[in-house]
Image (tube, grey):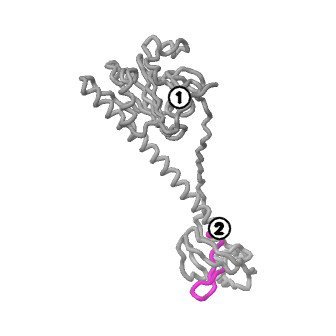
Amino acid sequence: MKKRIFCTALVLLMTAAVACTEADFQNIKNGKGDAVVLDVENLPAPDIKKPNTEIENNTENGDKDTDSENAIDSSDNTDVVNNTDSVETTDIIEKEKPSLDDYVIEETEGEYVLIKSAVVRSGPSTDFDKLGQLQADIVVEITGTTDNGWFQFEYDSVDGYINQKFFMDKETYDEEIALNESGEENQSEENNKEQTESTLASQIVAICNEYRVAEGLEPLTEDPELDALAQIRAEEIVVYFEHERPDGSDCFTVMKDYKCTLCGENIAAGQGNPKEVVDAWMDSEGHRANIMNKDFKRIGIGYSAGGEFGAYWAQLFAD
């Protein structure tokens, strides 16, 4: 395999253009025939296939379910008890107030975060008096754990209790916060990427239409569906810069489900912005012919950063 050697002091710019007639395009859709190459002067050496080793990570964060109840009772919470020995009378028995002596409390040390607001009790049960309430996301220094699953801690100079289901250890809490922030950053980066691609596409379409209108041609309409197909081609030419897809099929197979009878493609690599790439295309007879073709009505733009040349551009045209 042979590679073209470039001087490292030069800026590397590559462009290539191809168009397809109605008969050619129908042949391609049916798996027959080749596209007509309009300009091969600036095509790169054909043997520049190289694997794309960049991997994009996407971390998903699962939502955490929490209980909505602030109570786990280890004792009967009935205020009155009916005596069923006689159907004629009912004896009212007042329930005894619980005592801390009824619970085993083991010493515990550690910082925990309250994951939702909760009532503070004077003992490890909802039968004990309320002392107050703590808000979510505060750090609590736990001093003990009861045998029925409540945490003990200092509250207003006395022992307070909240069921441990409302807590998460601080280390785990911090890890989940970091993961959530990372996920938000990834989403923000993805949104910025989509916004950048959309802005670049609009700029290229506007510049091309300036040239067309100046010569009395109708402006091209940017087609979101064609944009999506051009984006596929932009990502493919990072791997293999040709009017041929990495799988060996013709470039127009990307449009096999797109409704048109005439189509064209311009590709380029190395240009730093929309003006530079359009100028490069307009300076080439084949590329200019696609941009200025009066039969083309729709256009799609694709852009991909990275690879050997830093920026890869693709235009798809349709009648």
- Tell me residue 8's x, y (percent): 52, 38
Q: Main secondary structure of the magenta part?
A: strand
Q: Residues within 10 Å of mark 1 (few under 14, many from 20)?
A: many
The range drawn in magenta is 152-168
Residue 206 lies in the magenta-colored region: no
Using residue 203 as the reference point, say whether residue 117 is left or right of it. right
Query: Label 2 amino acid?
Result: Glu
Residue 159 lies in the magenta-colored region: yes
Q: Quadrant of residue 115?
A: bottom right
The quadrant of the rendering that contains the C terminus is top left
The disc label shown at residue 241, or none: 1
- Tell me residue 234's x, y (percent): 49, 33
Q: Residues within 10 Å of mark 2 (few under 14, many from 20)?
A: few
Front residue of 237 and 68: 237
Q: Quadrant of residue 298?
A: top left
Residue beneath disc 2: 171
- Secondary structure beneath dot 2 equals helix
Using residue 297 as the reference point, say whether residue 43 is left or right of it. right
- For the point 59% across and 74% down, the residue is 139
